Image (cartoon, grey):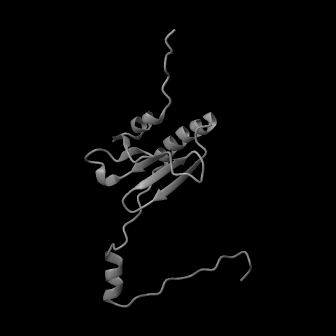
Amino acid sequence: MSDIEPIQFSPRRRAGAQALAAQTSSSYPTATCFTRLELNQILNLYGRKVADGEWRDYAIDFGREKAVFSVFRRASEVPLYRIEKSPKLATRQGAYSVVAATGHILKRGHDLARVLGVLERKVRLAAI
């Protein structure tokens, strides 16, 4: 065996009913994740906000019930916004939501692009 080859481990085999129960039970549900398209939409918005100097850091958390993309002004602070995906709410209010640092839900819906629209900069006209 050379230094380059990875070590191959094989799982232990269980006997009888234990093996069948282990295969059929789902005691550990899978984590909720963002799809590639969802993450692409979020990162496009994040890139524009970083270029404007508004945001500086982010964190992604994948839990059993929801996935969270947190946006920070500085890494040591609480997140400015949390973009959450909760599939449990998909049939009711919508799977996506944007939550402010205070905990208020700014927007919730079924379409991620429309929910992220709340974070886009709004152009205001000045009265002369």
Q: Which residue is at 37% across, 91% downward? A: 15
Could you tell me which residue is drawn at 36 percent across and 43 percent down? 105
Q: Residue furthest bottom?
A: 15
Vertical relation: 70 (above or below) 49 = below
Residue 52 appears left or right of 92: right
Name of the residue lying farthest toward the left: 92
- Look at the image and tell me in which quarter the N terminus lies: bottom right
Q: How many marks?
A: 0
Image vertical order of residue 13 relative to residue 84, above or below: below
Q: Position of residue 43 (x, y in %)?
A: 54, 43
The residue closer to the viewer here, 10 or 43, is: 43
**Residue furthest to the right:** 3
Pinpoint residue 30: horizontal percent, then vertical percent: 39, 65
Q: Residue at x 48, y 50 (%)?
A: 69
Pick the front one: 35 or 53: 53
Q: At 33% from the left edge and 90% from the top edge, which residue is drawn? A: 16
On the picture, is 40 further left or further right than 25?
right
**Residue 13 location in percent, x, y?**
44, 87
Closer-to-camera residue (128/16): 128
Q: Position of residue 72 (x, y in %)?
A: 55, 47
The correct choice, above or below, for 102 with respect to 116 in the image is below
